[in-house]
Image: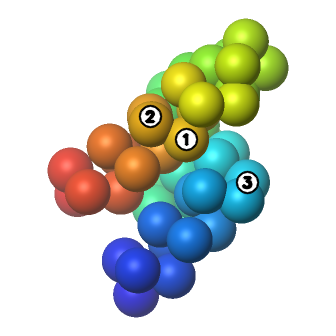
Amino acid sequence: MDLIRIIVAILLPPLGVFLQVGLGKHFWINIVLTLLGYIPGIVHAVWVIAKK
């Protein structure tokens, strides 16, 4: 299941984080990072998914 979440995180980083942690602080941090730059959003999403 983590592999699917990582693939989703590469395509849509906030969705990958949402599937892992819901509407918590990491979701909102990821929205901001994705808006600032797509790559930081991906890195944060993969980190959140790998951490849990």
Q: Which residue is mark 1?
A: 42
Residue 14's spot in the image, x, y percent?
A: 67, 45
**Residue in the image at 73% along x and 54% along y:** 12
What secondary structure is found at the residue carrying circle 1? helix
Q: Are marks 3 and 2 in contact (CB under 8 Å)?
A: no
Q: CA distance from mark 3 to mark 2?
A: 12 Å
Q: Are marks 3 and 1 in contact (CB under 8 Å)?
A: no
What secondary structure is found at the residue carrying circle 2? helix
- Under mark 1, the amino acid is Ile
Q: CA distance from mark 1 to mark 2?
A: 5 Å
Residue sitting farthest toward the top: 36
Residue 29's spot in the image, x, y percent?
A: 56, 22
Coloration of the structure image: rainbow
Q: Are marks 1 and 2 in contact (CB under 8 Å)?
A: yes
Query: For this view, does 39 lie left or right of residue 37?
Result: left
Of 32 and 41, which appears nearest the observer? Answer: 41
**Which tag, 3 or 2, sits closer to the chain's start?**
3
| Mark identifier at residue 12 | 3
- Under mark 3, the amino acid is Leu
**Residue in the image at 40% along x and 87% along y:** 1
Q: In the figure, residue 2 lies in which quadrant?
A: bottom left
**Residue in the image at 35% along x and 57% along y:** 49
Q: Which residue is mark 2?
A: 44
Residue 37's spot in the image, x, y percent?
A: 70, 19
* Crowding near the residue tagged with mark 1, few <14, some 14–19, many ≥20 C-alpha atoms within 10 Å: many
6 vs 23: above or below: below
- Under mark 2, the amino acid is His
